[in-house]
Each structure stands twice: as C-alpha cells, then as structure tokens.
Image (cartoon, rainbow, N blue to C red):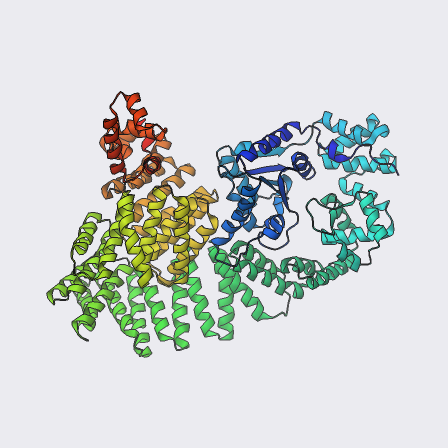
C-alpha cells in the first residue's frame, strides 16, 4: 500500500503563516504577563488544532482539554487541570472563581498555555469561566486558546456570545483568528505534496474542487487516491472516502473501529472487553485511523479525525449499533463514568427506561454546583425520552426540577409549563400539599412574566390547597399576597374579596401567630377601602389594627407592635404611610417616657427616609441619635449604618467607611441581619468607589450567600439589586445568577412591587451581560414601571441609568437620553455624585451636549467633584506620577502652595492617599474633565 508523500501536519500549515505569526507573537509576550483569551475558529478540517500545536513551545506549561462533552459541568476545564482541579461543592458564586483561580495559580508559578479544543461541544458552565478571561488580567502569564468549528454553531449557540464579547473587548479583535479555506494555489500545492508522483493535473484538480479548500478534506481525498491508485474511485464526498479507506483494513481492525466510532473515543482497556486484538489495534494506529490525542490519559485513543468516526457510525447496521451502545453503557457504568455520558449510550441503544434516571441524576449533580442551565437541558432531554407506562412519580419529580432550574435561569415560560403539568397531576391525584407548593411557585413565575390573571389564579389555588391541608395561616398569607397583587393592578374589589377570605382562614387557624396576620389583614383592608373611596372607614379600620396592639398589653408591647405596623407598611412599599407610622411611634414612645424605644424609632425612621430619597432628613435623624449618650447601642449602630450608607452613595468614602465599619461589626456580633445587609452593601460600595474591586466582590458574594440562607425579604432587595448591577458590570455570571436566585425567592414570597422590580432589574443585568440589549431594556423598563408605584427615587435613578445604557445599546437613543437625564437630575438632587457622574459620562458617550442637557453649572460641579481649576490641574499631574516638587516646577508654583492644593483635593475627594485620590477621580471621571 502506498502512503502519502508527506505527513499532513506539515502540509496543513500551507497558507497559515500569518496566523502562525500572530500566535507566536502572543507566546513571546506571554512571559511578560500579556495573556488572556484567544479564539481560533474554522470549518471542520480547517486545521485549527494543527495550527495551535505548531506554535506551542516545550518551555511553556501546556494544559489541554476539550473534545466531545463528558456530561460533567466544567468538563474540558477538569481535563485540562487534571490533579489541580479544585473542589466545587460550595455556593454557586464560588465555582467559576475557584476554577479560574486554579489556572491562574499555575500561571503565576510558570507561564501557562491552556488549549481547549472543540468548544462547540463545551458545556455552559465551561463557557462561563472562559468569559472571565475575555479581558486579560494585567501581569498574568496565562494564555487560554479556544478552538471551535464555525460550521457547527447554530443560531443562539453560547460560543457565538463568547466570540462577540471577545471582539467587543479592548484588543479583542486581535485575539480572534478565523481560518478561511485555502486558496486554489495552496490547495493544489498541498495535494501535490500528499500524492507525490501520482499527482497528475487531473487528479489534483479533482481533489481541489471537491475539498473546497479545507485541509482535512484535501488530506482524506488525496489518501483515497493514493490507496486505490485510480482517480475514478475518488469519492463524491468525504464520507465515501473514509469508508473506502476503512474497507482496506482487516475485519478485526474494522470491528475495533466500529466500537471506537460508537463510543466517540475509547480507552484500550474498554476495547479489550469487546475482544479487540492487539494486532487489530496496532493496524489502526499504523494506518493513521487511530491516534493518541495530545494530553490524553494512559490508554486513551480516538480517531485521527472526527469525520472518520461519523462515516463509520452511519455504516454500522442499526441492530449492531444498538448492541454496541448498550455494551458501552454497561462498561462505562462499571467504571463510574458520568451519568450523562452513560445515559447518552442507553438512549442510542433505545433503552429510555435506563437512560432517564441517569439524565435526572446528571441534572441533580449540575444543580448542586449551580449549573442550572446545564441541568435544565439535561432534564429536558430526559423528559423527551420518557417512555410510555413509566413511573409517573419520577416524571413529576423531573418536571418539578425542570421548573426550578428554568426559573433560576430566567426562563419563566419554560418554568411555568413544567410546573403547570405538575399542578395538573397533583390535582388529579389529590395531593393537596404538593399542589399548594407548586401553585405558589407558579404564581412567582407568572408575576415575573407580568401575567397577573394567571398569577392571581395560582395564588388563589395555593390558598385553597393550603386550607384543605389544614395550613390555614399559609392560606391566609397567599390570599393577602394575591390581594396585594390585585391592589397593584387596580382590581381593588377582587383584593377586598381575598382579604375577607383571608379573615376566614385566620379565624379558623386559631394560632398565636395569627395576631400578626390579623394586623396585616386589617391594615390591608383599611388601605384598600381607602383606595375604593371609603377614606374615613379605611383610615379608621387601619387604626383599629394598631388598636389591637395598643389595647393588649403594656406600653412596651404596644411600642413593639407599632414597630411591626410601621414595618409592615414599609414592607408593602407604602413608604409615606410607613414614615407617618414611624413618626407616630416616635411620638408615642416620647410621650410615655420610653426613651430607649424612642431612640430606636428615630433610628428606624432613617432607612425609610433613605429609601424615599430624603437623605438630608435621614442624616439629621441619625446624627441626633448618635449625639444622645443614653441611646441604646442598637439605635446608635442603626443610625451609624444608615449615615454611612448615605455617605457612600454620595461618594464620601472615607467618612462612610468609618461609620459602616463599626456598625457592621456590631451587626455581626448581635446577628442583626437587616443592619448586616445595609452595612455590607455600603462597605462594598465604598470599596468599589475606591478601586478595591476584589474586596467589593468578596463582600457582595458574602452578602448574597447570607440572603440566600435567610428569609429576610425587605432590606435585602435594594442591596441585591445593586449587587446584581455590580456583578453584571464585572462579568461575574455565577454571582449574578446567585443574586437573581435570591431576588426570585423574595419576589415569590412577598410579591411586592419593589422586590419584583429588583428581580426584573437583575434579569436585565443578565440579559445585558449576554449581549441582548433589547431584552435588557424591556426588563429595565418593567422595573421602572413597578418602581413608579412606590416612589423610590434612589432605586429609580440607578435603574434609569442602567436602562439608559441598555437603550443606547439597543439603538433607542432618544429614550436612552431621557432615562440618563432623569437619573442625573435625581442624583443631583440627592447629591449622589458617583451616580450623577455615571449619567454624565454615558450622555457624553452618546455625543450629548452636557451643558445644554444638564446646565453648565450643574455639569461643571459634577464633572470636577467640587475641585477648583488649579486643584484639577494638580490632580492631573498627581495621576501622572509627579511629586509635589515636580508639580510646583511644572506649574510655576511654590512647593507649599502645591502641598495646600493636594491637601484640599484629598479632602474634597474623601481620600487619605494620592493613590486613592487618583482612583476616586477616575471613578468620578474627574481626570477627563479637568484636563
């Protein structure tokens, strides 16, 4: 048998010198810390792997992964890391960061190249990690090269999003290589080298015409010509060429190749179980059909080209394919292979009853590492296999899991369809307890989809089912939640009907805990009656709710119930009523000499004032509490925390940090979760403003984890909404998912406009991060519509700013400008300088005339952070690294004058060091406006 005159590896690099040069330059820069993510794409057989392998140097550590999916989240990355793989049993937010840190730790020890082939088969969790390297880490000698087949990426494939993000990043286009087909001249040259003396013009023209410039096709077609010696048997397609080539092998070799074709890749010990003779295996290696892939483990083998296996697979008789898949499934099960991989073989063996439980097991494993989208895909695949007359309980468990995973991914329609099937089954079987739980879940996803009729129907079903199981208090809670939704939607009569039904549940429950429900129900009824026009009756009824507390015990108990009453109004986002209630409570306590309770009431008034944008009043109230030496520690710490949070919002980070740090320490020791959330959020904001992103990220991850572990549904909302924006801006997808998860739980539990708006905001951040600006804009607008009903200026302004960015990206420039201008004016009225600067910066990016839009005085004050022109000049030279003496010489000033200017600008920026001042100025965009 004749062989090609030249090995294909060398020939495939014809016409690829430019691409080789780009990769080699990247490797030269790598030891200096210039790395990041590179993508190499081309059609199947374009020579992507050969190109990358040709430039890799033995001086570098090279980690390889990829290939057909193993069914395990992070599969390619697990393969590349090998024994360095970190544990992933922790929270969702920990996994991507831990994986990235494992690679980066190796790179810090020695320059490292990670080559991940066949990204078109990579799981969503792996791609999430890769997005973290789209923007290279300065000074980190880590180069990640991902290769994928362009012709195997359908619309909506996540690799397309990854490619788009890379090309949009700074310098990203230079790190993207697209391998085009070879031109006619290079193709002909390659064919001549492969065919040697048999390369007649007619043969060369035929091969070049059929291969269409793809090196793999050229190689296979040329090999077929060499082996047959006759141009008439040149196949009509690459598949025909592969089958003719395989026909020249022995029967034993072909049988072994069939096993490998069915398995996709195989270990030699697995092949031995199928009676594979050593001679047959060696024949396949000698013929170049099988190879040991670079970086593969001991005994691992695969086809030289995937097309070989595909061609062989289609030629295997159907019955034999089924038998081979079943045998492979059993062999892999014995070896403890990933459930998804085993399930795939059982599916192809037409054994759905054996594949289904493995798909569910794989989905549950993905959920444990918070890979919800992968889990959702696995459950859907399992349900598609569902056999007739199978275990209905298992199917319902799968549908329930699908609903949960889809909801966590923001796929509300899919979640609703899954849970609707479970609800129908529960109804048919009379499982009232399960039906109640599923109806509550359905209400949550319907609300998120703005489908109020179905959301209310689900709440009512949940209430009815809870009542049938004797859980009347839960039934009352569902009815009150539904009443709140109807009230928000303007159906006050329907809301009143539900409140009356809630009263029946409360009366039937006869539990001590119904006292709070009574107050809530009476307060809600009074508010609804007031909205219906029964103002006097409604107000009187609301007061009677408080009278139940006032008449039931001592003043101290009444003070506590006053707290609950005011907090209930605030939880329902009725902030004006809540402010009145806190004020009344304060007067009540002062009139009765309950000084300690009065200080607490005054301190608790500050969060409501902050929420409603009355920041100066909040600062005044908080400072009054701090000035009183007899104020309880809890009151002083709440006041300090609120003062710190407002100062953080205004950009005074040094002062804010002092207040927040001591309040945070107190909150942790005394387990005051609401204060813990506010101070943690405030400290994260100060860290972000001071350029301490690592610290901010750690704080927000801790905050999110605490919110997921607790059942606090009010103080968490604003903090999680801001954290979602932070995680989205920093492309921390796992953390953003955890935030969305927490907000989804809160929205489902409370149904308040504020919580639902925050959830819509978080989902908008996710959509914006994935490049879907139109969807993001819709979600931000949904959030703004919800916020309009509760009048929360700070939250509204921040959402307006994000909406402006999304609208601009979606091409809605006029609406974007409107949102950004609105955000700016609200921020200016609050003196929230960082937010005002952000709005200004985005308007400038849109080419707007800032002075015309915002007013010259306001724009100037925002742009310069209150710095004089001279202080701005000094700050710019400080940022350039000049000393005070050098600045004095440059500006023809005395050193003492420069010292004075530096002290002044540090004070105005709220910083202690020159480095902090520069970071702060960059955050406020001051450097660009004073230059």
* Left or right placement of residue 205 versus residue 770 in this view: right
Q: Which percent across, then down, holds residue 826?
A: 26, 42
* Left or right placement of residue 780 versus residue 245 in this view: left
The quarter of the picture where residue 333 lies is: bottom right
Q: Against 443, is 69 above or below?
A: above
Q: Image point 40% across, 41% down: which residue?
A: 806
Q: Which percent across, then down, holds residue 129?
A: 53, 47
Q: Residue furthest top?
A: 892
* Left or right placement of residue 761 versus residue 584 in this view: right
The C terminus is located in which quarter? top left
Q: Which percent across, then down, holds residue 613?
A: 24, 49
The quarter of the picture where residue 458 lies is: bottom left
- Residue 616 seen in the figure: yes
* Total tally of numbered discs in the picture: 0
Q: Residue furthest left?
A: 591
**Residue sitting nearer the eye, 557 or 393:** 557
**Residue sitting nearer the eye, 58 or 126:** 58
* Left or right placement of residue 354 versus residue 479 in this view: right
- Residue 156 seen in the figure: no
**Residue sitting nearer the eye, 666 or 503:** 666
**Residue sitting nearer the eye, 362 or 792:** 362
Q: Which percent across, then down, holds residue 422?
A: 51, 67
The N terminus is located in which quarter? top right
Q: Against 361, is 252 above or below?
A: above
The quarter of the picture where residue 567 lies is: bottom left
């Amino acid at each position: 048998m004749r062989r090609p005159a030249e090995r294909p590896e060398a020939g495939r690099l014809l016409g690829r010198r430019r691409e080789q040069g780009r990769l080699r330059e990247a490797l030269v820069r790598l030891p200096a810390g210039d790395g990041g993510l590179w993508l190499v794409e081309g059609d199947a057989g374009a020579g992507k792997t050969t190109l990358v392998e040709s430039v890799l140097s033995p001086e570098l550590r090279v980690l390889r992964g990829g290939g057909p999916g193993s069914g395990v989240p992070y599969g390619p990355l697990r393969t590349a890391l090998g024994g360095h793989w970190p544990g992933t049993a922790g929270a969702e937010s920990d996994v991507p960061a831990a994986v990235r840190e494992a690679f980066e730790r190796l790179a810090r020890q020695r320059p490292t190249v990670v080559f991940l082939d066949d990204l078109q088969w990579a799981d969503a969790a792996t791609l999430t990690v890769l997005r973290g390297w789209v923007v290279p880490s300065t000074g980190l000698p880590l180069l990640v090269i991902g290769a994928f087949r362009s012709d195997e990426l359908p619309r909506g494939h996540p690799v397309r999003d990854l490619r788009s993000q890379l090309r949009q990043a700074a310098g990203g286009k230079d790190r993207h290589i697209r391998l085009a087909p070879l031109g006619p001249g290079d193709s002909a040259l390659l064919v001549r080298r492969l065919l040697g003396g048999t390369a007649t013009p007619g043969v060369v023209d035929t091969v070049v015409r059929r291969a269409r410039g793809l090196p793999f096709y050229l190689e296979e077609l040329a090999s077929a010509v060499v082996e047959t010696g006759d141009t008439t048997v040149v196949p009509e397609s690459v598949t025909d060429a592969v089958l003719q080539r395989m026909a020249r092998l022995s029967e034993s070799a072909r049988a072994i190749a069939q096993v490998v074709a069915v398995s996709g890749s195989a270990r030699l010990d697995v092949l031995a179980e199928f009676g594979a003779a050593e001679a047959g295996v060696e024949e396949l290696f000698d013929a170049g059909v099988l190879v040991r892939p670079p970086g593969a483990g001991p005994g691992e083998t695969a086809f030289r080209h995937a097309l070989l296996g595909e061609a062989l697979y289609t030629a295997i008789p159907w019955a034999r394919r089924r038998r081979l898949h079943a045998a492979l499934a059993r062999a892999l099960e014995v070896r403890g292979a990933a459930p998804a991989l085993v399930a795939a073989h059982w599916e192809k063996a037409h054994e759905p009853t054996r594949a289904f439980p493995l798909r569910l097991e794989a989905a549950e494993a993905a959920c444990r590492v918070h890979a919800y989208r992968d889990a959702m895909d696995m459950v859907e695949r399992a349900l598609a296999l569902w056999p007739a007359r199978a275990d209905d309980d298992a199917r319902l468990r799968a549908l329930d899991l699908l609903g949960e995973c889809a909801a966590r991914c923001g796929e509300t329609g899919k979640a609703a369809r899954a849970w609707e099937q479970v609800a129908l089954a529960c109804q048919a079987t009379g499982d009232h307890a399960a039906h109640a739980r599923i109806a509550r879940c359905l209400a949550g996803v319907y609300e998120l989809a703005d489908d109020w009729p179905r959301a209310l129907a689900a709440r009512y079903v949940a209430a009815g089912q809870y009542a049938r199981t004797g859980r009347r208090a839960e039934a009352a809670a569902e009815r009150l939640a539904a009443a709140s939704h109807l009230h928000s939607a303007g159906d006050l009569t329907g809301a009143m009907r539900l409140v009356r039904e809630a009263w029946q549940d409360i009366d039937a429950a006869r539990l001590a805990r119904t006292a709070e429900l009574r107050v809530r129900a009476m307060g809600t009824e009074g508010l609804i009656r007031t909205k219906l026009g029964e103002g006097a009756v409604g107000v009187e009824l609301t007061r009677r709710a408080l009278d139940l507390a006032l008449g039931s015990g001592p003043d101290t108990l009444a003070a506590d119930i006053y707290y609950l009453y005011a907090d209930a109004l605030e939880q329902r986002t009725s902030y004006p009523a809540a402010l009145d209630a806190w004020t009344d409570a304060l007067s009540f306590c002062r009139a009765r000499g309950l000084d300690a309770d009065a200080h607490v009431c005054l301190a608790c008034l500050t969060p409501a004032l902050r929420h409603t944008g009355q920041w100066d009043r909040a600062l005044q109230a908080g400072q009054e509490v701090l000035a009183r030496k007899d104020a309880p520690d809890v009151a002083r710490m709440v006041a300090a925390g609120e003062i710190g949070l407002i100062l953080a919002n205004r950009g005074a980070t040094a002062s804010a940090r002092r207040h927040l740090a001591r309040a945070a320490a107190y909150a942790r020791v005394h387990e005051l979760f609401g204060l813990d959330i506010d101070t943690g959020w405030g400290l994260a904001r100060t860290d972000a403003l001071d350029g301490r992103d690592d610290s901010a990220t750690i704080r927000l991850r801790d905050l999110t984890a605490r919110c997921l572990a607790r059942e606090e549904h009010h103080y968490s909302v604003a903090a999680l909404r801001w954290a979602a924006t932070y995680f989205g801006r920093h492309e921390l997808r796992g953390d953003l998912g955890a935030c969305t998860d927490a907000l989804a739980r809160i929205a489902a539990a409370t149904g308040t406009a504020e919580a639902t708006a925050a959830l819509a905001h978080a989902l908008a951040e996710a959509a914006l991060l994935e490049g879907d600006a139109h969807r993001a804009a819709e979600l931000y607008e949904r959030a703004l519509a919800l916020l309009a009903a509760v009048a929360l200026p700070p939250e509204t302004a921040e959402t307006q700013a994000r909406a402006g960015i999304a609208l601009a990206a979606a091409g809605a420039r006029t609406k974007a400008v409107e949102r950004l201008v609105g955000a700016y004016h609200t921020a200016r009225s609050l003196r929230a300088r960082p937010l005002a600067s952000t709005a200004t910066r985005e308007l400038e990016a849109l080419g707007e005339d800032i002075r015309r839009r915002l007013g010259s005085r306001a724009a100037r004050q925002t742009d310069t952070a209150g710095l004089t022109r001279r202080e701005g000049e000094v700050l710019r030279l400080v940022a350039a690294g000049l000393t005070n003496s050098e600045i004095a010489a440059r500006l023809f000033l005395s050193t003492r004058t420069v010292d004075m200017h530096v002290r002044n600008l540090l004070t105005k920026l709220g910083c202690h060091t020159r480095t902090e001042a520069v970071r702060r100025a960059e955050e406020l965009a001051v450097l660009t406006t004073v230059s």
